[in-house]
Image (cartoon, rainbow, N blue to C red):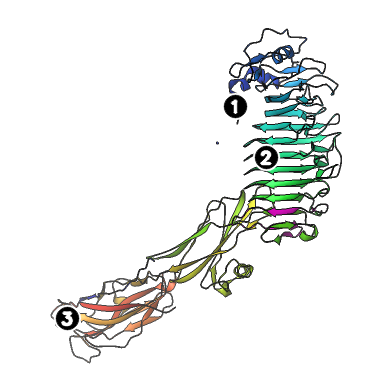
Amino acid sequence: MKKIFQMVLTIFCLFVFGRIYTYADELLSPSSESSSNFSTEIQNTEEEIESLALAGNGTESNPYQVSNVSDLQTALAKPITSGNALYIQLVSDIVYRGNDKNKNINKNTVLDGAGHYILYNDTSYDQSLFETSADNLNITFKNIKYGNTTYPNNSYWGMLFTINSRINFVVENIDWNIKNGSQPFWGDSNPSNTLTFKGRNNFKSAGDKKGGEFVEGFSTINFSDDSKTTVYNDSTDSDAVFWCSKQQINIGKNATLDITTSKETLIQDGGDAQINVQEKGRFSCKFFYGSYYKDSGAKLINSLIGGSITLNFSKDAVGIFRTEKDSFSGKNPTINATSPDYILFESSATNKSILSGITPKFIRKDSDSYNYPIDYLTASGQNHFVSNVVGSQNVSASNIQKGYSVIYARASRIAGLDAESKVAKDLSIIEAQVKQDTMNQLNSRKTSYKLATQKLYSGNDITQDTSQNSIDKATSANGVIDSPIVNGSNDSMYVFKNLLAQTYYLYSKIDEGRSSASGYTFASSWIEQVVQVQPLLLVTIPDQIEFNSIQSGEFGKSDNLNNYVVINHGNVPANVDFKAITTNPGCSPDVSLVDKFGDESGKLVLNLTAENIASAKSETWGPLVEGKQMLSNPMKLDPFWEQSNQASLYVNGKHSVTMSSGPKVVNYSIKVEVLQAST
């Protein structure tokens, strides 16, 4: 006879939700391409080409077309309408000699090289190429190349020799590669002279005769917004990169000036010199021991008339001062910092004290909410000097243990921390992600988390050093259950899985590197988020159990037709307990439930057993008698991620049922109670 056993389960579940200059086709014209191929001698000197009538009318839209020195001399002598400028464009490379005359510029002039070369064919470096002695002129040279393998030298007086003049000289997209006579810019030190760089410019001066500074005699030097200029100077004679009284060097917004030099000094005879780096600008200077200029010194300024040097850095600006020679010496710099990214002084030799000859003074000018620490490197690694500069701070060699590198930098900061708990069937998680903060020019990022079942610091102020140190040191002994590190700048998410329902304390910080500041990382402060994971009580139990019956006697687990399993899908431990049994309609009246029997017919002693699959521990409820209260022990099932979250369920017992009248069908409903168990 087959008997049917049906159970009805009432379960209570609680959910609380809780963007390059292009000159069009001229740059790719045959004349431009041939300018870089000197397998045959250039045939456009003034002795070899007879000047023809100039094409163009000297306006911006129709400039004079120049193909040789004679054309150039003719064009420079052309008159212009008052208030306008003379526009000249090269249509081939130009080769000149030092004794070429009539190169005076006496009007506002724009000379566009259109990607061609202006080359110097002379052994004397004391003759000027172009010169001016006029006042209040605007002169622009752009898209010009200087120096190649055939003609590698130039005039010592540079691109434009200024004599008793006041000019604004603009250079744009210049490629300068000169060995001897290699100084690109010479002015007469008039305080009104201005030199402005636009576009992309590259200057290399490397030779053993008639070298000089990069710029001499221009008191104001501007590197325009978004420009990029590189300077390499390893030349003889002069001792500095810049030489002028009361020098002011301005690096515009998002502009870059990178200097590599063997000179002893960055600015000579500067008086009160200034370097101003605007928002997102970058200034870098590296001193190295040269092949032509050989000196071991490295100074930011060497003024013969006293004076000082002030470095001003605006929001997100970068300043880098490196030396492969001796440590920095000379005047102490004053550094005004208004929310820069970082300012770095560094020696290439880790056994040298970078500040042995200077004591920089950092003055913080901003009032933003970031910390600006001063850190330094020694052979043992990164160290803190000041956690956050407030006001001003002098830094000496002794302050940084004679470290080879020191940096003033904006510390990392987390803009916020998103943390959300999610609970569902077989799911109990916290999704954590720091809100990205893109203020810093990142090189790398590590995001650290700690999830704990208790607060990891005492008091109410997490920003205090004692609180931060306490979180840093906290381990599992302090309630930490997970402490992952996520690498990468873009994705900082981490999912904490399989969490018991309770209150959690989530902590996070980020450690970031900086471009061009290898060896450093800058950690944010730990921040905290309290997260509640709500309980979910969810146990599934089969709604009926089928088993085979014999005529009489005992039956057990092997007689059950299938493997019936009780499963805890919730995030809390659950107690499963029998409460009551009732007879359903259709149950054979010839069978009755009893708690015991002798030899009488038609009786059924029925038990319900739950056996934990992981531990094999079992609980048996019964005998089950309708309307009778009984004492029983619950079966405990652990949360869903544990192996002990399941139990086999089966009926067993014995019966004395007469089979002479055919199989008897039994049908019962079982009420089972599921409650949250203690952990």
Question: Do residues under tags 3 and 1 come within 8 Å of each other at their CB atoms?
Answer: no
Decide whether residue 137 is among the magenta residues.
no
- Where is residue 443? Give x, y as percent: 62, 49
- Where is residue 306? Give x, y as percent: 84, 45
Q: 117 or 196, which is in the foreground?
A: 196
Amino acid carrying label 1: it is: Thr
For disc 2, the neighbor class at 10 Å (few under 14, some 14 to 19, many from 20) is many
Q: 437 or 640, which is in the foreground?
A: 437
Quarter of the image where one finds residue 169: top right
For disc 1, the neighbor class at 10 Å (few under 14, some 14 to 19, many from 20) is few
Helix, strand or loop status at disc 1: loop
For marks 2 and 3, the one nearer the N-term is 2
Quarter of the image where one finds residue 422: bottom left
Amino acid carrying label 3: it is: Met
Amino acid carrying label 2: it is: Ile
For marks 3 and 1, the one nearer the N-term is 1
Q: Which residue is mark 1?
A: 22
- Where is residue 286? Give x, y as percent: 76, 43
Q: 165 or 500, which is in the foreground?
A: 165
**Position of residue 361 in the picture relative to residue 293 (left or right):** left
Q: Which residue is mark 3?
A: 659
For marks 2 and 1, the one nearer the N-term is 1
Q: Which residue is mark 2?
A: 251
Residue 266 in sight from this viewpoint: no
- In the orientation shown, which residue stands out farthest toward the left? 661
Q: Which residues are magenta?
A: 355-383
- Where is residue 627? Give x, y as percent: 21, 86
Vertical arrangement, residue 308 with respect to residue 585, above or below: above
Helix, strand or loop status at disc 2: strand
- The residue sitting at 86% across, 34% down in the picture is 237
The N terminus sits in image quarter:
bottom left
**Position of residue 333 in the picture relative to residue 209 (left or right):** left
